[in-house]
Amino acid sequence: KQIISQVVQSNSADNLKLIFRDNSFQDQLQSLSVNKEAVTQVAPSGDTTQRYEDGSIRRGFSETSQQDQKMVVTQLVPPKLCRRRAMTDDLLEISYIGRLANTGEIFDGSAVMINGRGIPGRGNDVSLFFVLGKQPFGQFPPGWDVGLEGMCVGERRRVVIPP
């Protein structure tokens, strides 16, 4: 609230547009069915140029922009039985494969091997554990907290997270 108040009181509030996410994305996740998508916008399209306070482009940077950044969650395999859905603070055990959207190249995964050997620190496990909604910044993609909420044991989802 304090940051929003400071921006509104400053001169930079002329073009300020705040978008608050409603619960419709969470509702979509709760009612996912096979091959149906739940979609939410995580960043709007527009100018992403690194600029000084006066609006001029920072030295060494060029003018850049981005398209709308949307996160898409698709159910691939439904759970056989779901008595309880995953919620914040739940300990989840997941297997995953990270692929680049444009090439399909694998860049990470819970069971990925390098030169036939497991990745140090993973103990050759094919799954990993994390607490939904409570990860230290940078430990796991923040999109996991959003895309895995409401998931059931045995369910498989595709979570597409924009760059």
Image (cartoon, rainbow, N blue to C red):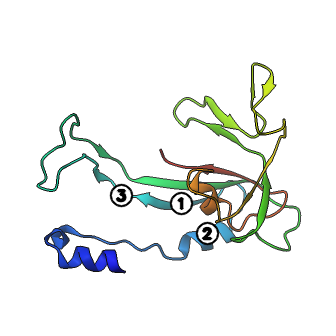
Disc 1 packing (10 Å; few <14; some 14–19; many ≥20) = some
Q: Amino acid at mark 1?
A: Val
Disc 2 packing (10 Å; few <14; some 14–19; many ≥20) = some
Q: CA distance from mark 3 to mark 1?
A: 14 Å
Q: Nearer the viewer, mark 2 or mark 3?
A: 3
Q: Which residue is the site of mark 1?
A: 39
Q: Which residue is the site of mark 3?
A: 44
The part of the image, by quadrant, that contains residue 8 is bottom left
Q: Amino acid at mark 2?
A: Gln
* Residue 90 higher or lower than 61, as above or below: below
Are the two marked residues, 3 and 1, in contact with CB atoms closer than 8 angstroms?
A: no
Q: Which mark is residue 74?
A: none
Are the two marked residues, 1 and 2, in contact with CB atoms closer than 8 angstroms?
A: yes
Across and down, in percent, residue 124 comes to 84, 35
Q: Which residue is the site of mark 2?
A: 28
Disc 3 packing (10 Å; few <14; some 14–19; many ≥20) = few
Report helix, strand or loop for mark 1. strand
Q: Amino acid at mark 3?
A: Pro
3 or 1: tag closer to the N-terminus = 1
Across and down, in percent, residue 135 comes to 64, 59
Q: CA distance from mark 1 to mark 2?
A: 8 Å
Give the residue at x 86% y 74%. 83
2 or 3: tag closer to the N-terminus = 2
